[in-house]
Amino acid sequence: MVPPRPSIHDRPQPADPAMRTELIARIRREIQAGCYDTPEKFAIAMERMLGIVCEKMDPPSYPPHPTSES
């Protein structure tokens, strides 16, 4: 299972603003080239999303199944 992604406030921020600018520029180039999204990134995002959804759902409240012994 993939651990939840830390909040933006919990992630370390680059000390050098130029580093962040280059990171953003690189990501934009990858998006334009169509190589930023990968099957691995998609799988991680899906696991995180399902984890959030499952945490927020209540367990089903179905009545118990009758047994054949009754």
Image (cartoon, rainbow, N blue to C red):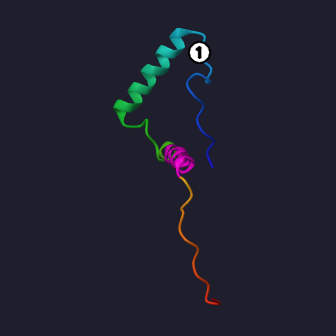
The disc labelled 1 sits on which kind of residue? Pro
Q: Judge the density around disc 1: few (<14), some (14-19), many (≥20) Cα neighbours within 10 Å.
A: few
Q: Give the image location of residue 34, x and y in percent.
A: 36, 37
Say if 26 sits above or below 1 in the image.
Answer: above
User: Which residue is painted at 39% across and 25% down in the image?
Assistant: 28
- 19 or 55, nearer to the observer: 55
**Quarter of the picture holding the C terminus:** bottom right
Say if 9 sits above or below 62 in the image.
Answer: above
Q: Could you tell whether 34 is left or right of 40 in the image?
A: left
Say if 7 sits above or below 47 in the image.
Answer: above
User: Which residue is painted at 61% across and 45% down in the image?
Assistant: 2
Residue 55, magenta (yes or no): yes
Residue at the left extreme of this rendering: 32
Span shown in magenta: 43-57
Q: Which residue is mark 1?
A: 14
Q: Could you tell whether 3 is left or right of 47 in the image?
A: right
- 49 or 14, nearer to the observer: 49
Q: Give the image location of residue 18, x and y in percent.
A: 51, 10
User: Which residue is painted at 57% across and 28% down in the image?
Assistant: 7
Question: Which secondary structure type mostly characterizes the magenta part of the structure?
Answer: helix
